[in-house]
């Protein structure tokens, strides 16, 4: 399936099943592959941050994480069939790791949160062989040491749970050194798995209203974010 451009943003037209197959190809080929999801917030940030835009353009797999991007593609008569939410892909890939013997590494969030994520996945998948985990608090001087730790773990997949553009920049900078076949930034997905942040009801996810649920949960932080990004996205779409 070809890669398309939605208002200048590259997006792969894979559905969930095809994305997982592509990820397994990366793992089996043992060549470092960076994955990214794009939603409205990241789309707008790309317009303001040329470095982030270049990193995203260079990613091996790019999924549309938000329904507004899917709707925009359809309005523009582009063949983007469905949303592949990052948190859903993350959890599906952990299932695949348990089934196929791939070894994940978890990097991000506070120590007790990432430890809780590890415990939850180990309970759900007793056969899951976890390569390692680490919290997401570090200085620039520690990056090389962390990249060495991840490389030495011989992980097959790494899931990075901190905010954009920091996670994209870290993976772009260190993926070749870490030699992890599949690298994915998962943002706040660790908090979702740990139960500290709730997903919107399925009907809201399918209706493209997940943003409203997030505002409901974190009104101060999320209101500012959506007020800053949604009008810009609509203006670009209008143009």
Image (cartoon, rainbow, N blue to C red):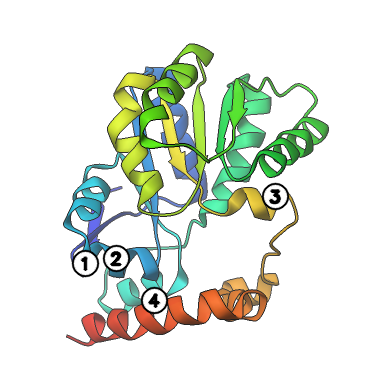
Residues 73 and 131: in front is 131
Q: Secondary structure at mark 3?
A: helix
Residue placed under numbered mark 4 in the picture = 71
Label of residue 48 in the image: 1
Q: Where's residue 168, x and y in %?
A: 35, 45
Residues 54 and 63: in front is 54
Q: Answer above or below: position of 177 versus 78.
A: above
Q: Is residue 4 left or right of residue 230?
A: left
Q: Secondary structure at mark 2?
A: helix
Do tag 4 and tag 3 residues touch (Cβ < 8 Å)?
no
Which dot, 3 or 1, sits closer to the camera? 1
Name the quadrant of the C terminus.
Answer: bottom left
Do tag 3 and tag 1 residues touch (Cβ < 8 Å)?
no
Do tag 1 and tag 4 residues touch (Cβ < 8 Å)?
no
Q: Where's residue 191, x and y in %?
A: 66, 53
What is the distance, in whole Å, between disc 4 and disc 3 at their CAs?
27 Å
Say which residue appears at 42% left-offset and 17% top-offset: 148
Do tag 2 and tag 1 residues touch (Cβ < 8 Å)?
yes
Residue placed under numbered mark 2 in the picture = 45
Tell me which numbered mark, 2 or 3, is placed earlier along the sequence.
Answer: 2
What is the distance, in whole Å, between disc 3 and disc 1 at their CAs?
31 Å
Residue placed under numbered mark 3 in the picture = 193
Label of residue 33 in the image: none
Q: Is residue 70 left or right of residue 215?
A: left
Which dot, 1 or 4, sits closer to the camera? 1
What is the distance, in whole Å, between disc 1 and disc 4 at their CAs?
22 Å
Q: Secondary structure at mark 4?
A: helix
Q: Where's residue 228, x and y in %?
A: 36, 81
Q: Where's residue 201, x and y in %?
A: 70, 72
- Residue 146: image quadrant is top left
What is the distance, in whole Å, between disc 2 and disc 3 at their CAs?
26 Å
């Amino acid at each position: 399936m070809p890669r398309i451009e939605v208002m200048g943003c590259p997006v792969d037209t894979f559905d969930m099943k095809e994305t997982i197959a592509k990820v397994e190809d990366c793992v089996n080929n043992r060549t470092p592959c960076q994955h990214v999801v794009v939603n409205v917030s990241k789309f707008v940030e790309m317009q303001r941050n040329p470095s982030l835009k270049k990193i995203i353009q260079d990613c091996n797999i790019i999924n549309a994480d938000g329904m507004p991007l899917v709707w925009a593609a359809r309005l523009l008569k582009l063949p983007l069939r469905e949303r592949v939410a990052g948190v859903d892909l993350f959890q599906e890939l952990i299932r695949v790791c348990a089934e196929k013997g791939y070894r994940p590494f978890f990097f991000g969030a506070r120590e007790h949160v990432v430890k809780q994520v590890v415990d939850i996945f180990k309970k759900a998948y007793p056969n899951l062989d976890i390569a390692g985990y680490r919290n997401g608090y570090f200085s620039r001087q520690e990056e090389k040491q962390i990249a060495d730790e991840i490389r030495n773990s011989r992980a097959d997949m790494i899931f990075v749970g901190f905010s954009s553009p920091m996670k994209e920049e870290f993976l772009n900078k260190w993926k070749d050194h870490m030699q992890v076949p599949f690298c994915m930034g998962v943002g706040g997905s660790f908090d979702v798995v740990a139960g500290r942040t709730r997903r919107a009801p399925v009907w809201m996810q399918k209706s493209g209203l997940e943003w409203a649920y997030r505002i409901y949960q974190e009104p101060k932080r999320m209101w500012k974010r959506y007020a800053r990004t949604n009008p810009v996205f609509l203006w670009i779409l209008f143009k």
